[in-house]
Amino acid sequence: MFTLAIWWLGVSVEALLIARGFVGKLIRRFPVFYSYIFFVFVQDILRMSVLKWLPARYSQVYWITQFVSFVLGSAVIFEIYRVALRIFPGTAKMARNVLLLLFGIVFARALALPFGGFPGWIPHAFEILEKQLRMLQGLALLGLVVVFLWYAIPFGKNLWCILLGYSVFVVASAFQLTLFTNYLNQIEQYWPYVQPITYLLVLTLWTWGLWSEYPVPVAAREMQLESDYESLVASTSRQLGRLRSRARRAVLP
Amino acid sequence: MMTASLLAAACIILLILVALIRDSHRHEPGSTKVARNVAHQNPAGSVPCPPLVRQIFSPEDFTFISKLQSQHLSQIYSRERRAVALFWVQQVSRDASRVMREHRLVSRRAEHLRPSVESLLILHYVDLQLTCGCLVFLIWTFGPHPFASLAGHAGRTSRFMALLLASIEAGLRLPTPENEAGF
């Protein structure tokens, strides 16, 4: 009964979020995010219908929709990157390199670790796969956030709420799936409630942050010509080198 | 358990960083192009010149004060010189932060930014900040002349170890052929 109430509440908040997206004209600014919310809205109704009328098919429907939801969620991360860095091409290039490096490390690690064979992997295969994919999303978010902070990218309230909400969702999912695969016996009774309640909190955050459109702070324009970047790099290197030699003079007076 | 703890730590770090994003752009310096040019022409104007830096960290003054054999004077000297040394190191660190902040704010719009060059600059900056951090630690621990004090401390420790080993060897009275004959 309680889980059904949470489910109804979640669906209602999703509908409200989509409605406010139309009213506040935010759908044009964040089309991928609202597509994700709309898909989750349809997915929730579909799953509940399948659970009620075709319970034998529920597992298949759950994992197929979960996979599509994951792909759309990854597209949300890409939209955050695209919207935030639209007028910062230099930072966008750094962000792409950081993400490529992180994914390269993850895949190299995956290739290097020995594969223990299918029999031990199958019982919790999908949970383990989802956990790995959520950790990959978390890593991508971490890389993006570090780049945003380093280059002081201005964020409006709308985009910041999307980023914060999705980060909380990814973090909570990865954490819950780690607990599920390692401590199933201890948390089995709480499992049906934890994820839905977490997602409901995230939906509430998104509804609050996306209630209406907020302007993005404008960053002052500094660069004029391409040649300025080369001279900037040379100047910065020179200054850092000078400071470093002075610091070393303290070590070797 | 280890994996869950590491995951929890990474998650907390991610959420803290996201929370910091909201106001990160508000700390941009109000630099116009003119102000930036002035800063670049006089980049480390607040850092004392090299001869003064050598004087701050040189043990010559400490040697002179020590010869006066006044404990009170030595304490005053250590306290004041330590404060000057720390202030200098922190000034270098602040100047480095200012240089990198200006670089970041200007380069973020560069269409042909080179990630390899940026990465190298970041490494140099981190190296400089780590050097300053180590200097602060050494100055706090060993006083305003950390490496002279460190060398003196190492010398005293090695003499103490030598005396200790000699005492242990004398106390053990290692058996000799003359001693065993008594049994």
Image (cartoon, coloured by chain):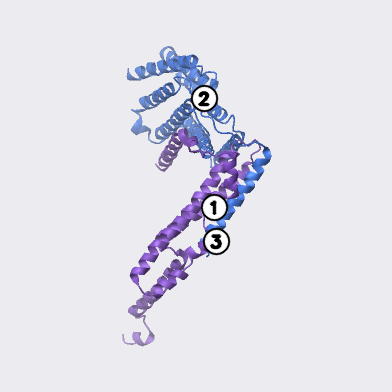
The mark nearer the N terminus, 3 or 1, is: 1
Q: Is residue A65 above or below residue A88?
A: above
In the rendered image, which quarter is residue B138 located in? bottom left
Q: Please name which of the two marks, 2 or 3, marks the residue nearer to the observer.
A: 3
Report crowding for label 1: few under 14, some 14 to 19, many 20 or more residues within 10 A (C-alpha): few
The amino acid beneath tag 2 is Phe
The residue carrying mark 2 is: A67
The x and y percentages for residue B10 are 45, 39
Residues at marks 3 and 1, CA–CA distance in whole angstroms = 12 Å
Helix, strand or loop for disc 2: helix
Q: Is residue A41 above or below residue B53?
A: above
Q: Are marks 2 and 3 in contact (CB under 8 Å)?
A: no
The residue carrying mark 1 is: B45
The amino acid beneath tag 3 is Pro
* Count of marks overlaid on the render: 3
What colour do you see for chain B?
A: purple
The x and y percentages for residue A21 are 48, 17
The x and y percentages for residue A159 are 49, 27
The x and y percentages for residue B44 are 55, 52
- In the rendered view of the protein, which quadrant contains the C terminus of chain B? bottom left
Helix, strand or loop for disc 3: helix
Give me the residue at 57% from left, 58% from top: A245
- Between A238 and A193, which is closer to the camera in this rendering? A238
- Between A17 and B175, which is closer to the camera in this rendering? A17
Report crowding for label 3: few under 14, some 14 to 19, many 20 or more residues within 10 A (C-alpha): some
- Between B137 and A31, which is closer to the camera in this rendering? B137
Chain identifier for the blue-coloured part of the image: A
Helix, strand or loop for disc 1: loop
Name the subunit of mark 3: B
Q: Is residue B91 visible?
A: yes
The amino acid beneath tag 1 is Gly
Left or right: where B98 falls relative to B115: left
